Image: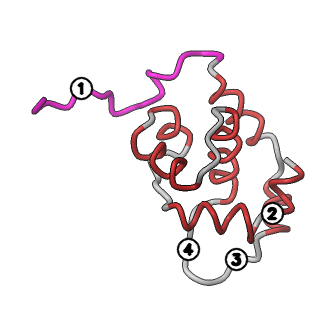
Amino acid sequence: MDQLFLPMDLEELIPPGHVVRVVNEAVNRISDDVFLKYYPGGGRSGFHPKMLTKVLVYAYTQKIYSSRQIAKALRENIPFMWLAARQTPDFRTINRFRSQRMKGLIDDV
């Protein structure tokens, strides 16, 4: 309980062929230009739209649709942690991303 047992590299905990790897590879194949077309930038730096897209697509494959549940999974679920590179956007960020910023992109993906 007072020791850290998780490997520092979460890669070891994700088996080959796991659906999270499939989602990661599929979204990585989408050109960055597609994301930049929907994301004008500006303001303070945020989370990369490709990472947020991966998280949303994976969440939907796991039947997780609530932005609060997705944010919780990013803190507690190893495949989500691996996919987001341990970044933890809050539920407001996730909700704004899918409902405002990138709605057209998410529908296309």
Q: Is residue 7 above or below residue 50?
A: above
Q: Quadrant of the N terminus?
A: top left
Q: Position of residue 88 (x, y in %)?
A: 46, 55
> Which mark sits nearer the N-terminus, 4 or 1?
1
Q: Which mark is residue 103?
A: 2
Q: Which mark is residue 5?
A: 1
> Which mark sits nearer the N-terminus, 2 or 4?
4
Three-letter residue code for mark 1 = Phe
Q: Nearer the viewer, mark 2 or mark 4?
A: 2
Three-letter residue code for mark 2 = Lys
Query: Magenta stretch?
Result: 1-17
Label 4 environment density (alpha carbons within 10 Å; few <14, some 14–19, many ≥20): few
Q: Which SS type dominates the magenta stretch?
A: loop
Q: Is residue 103 above or below residue 17?
A: below
Three-letter residue code for mark 3 = Gly
Label 1 environment density (alpha carbons within 10 Å; few <14, some 14–19, many ≥20): few
Label 4 to label 3, Cα distance in Å? 8 Å
> Which mark sits nearer the N-terminus, 3 or 2?
3
Label 3 environment density (alpha carbons within 10 Å; few <14, some 14–19, many ≥20): few
Label 1 to label 3, Cα distance in Å? 39 Å
Q: Is residue 109 left or right of residue 6?
A: right
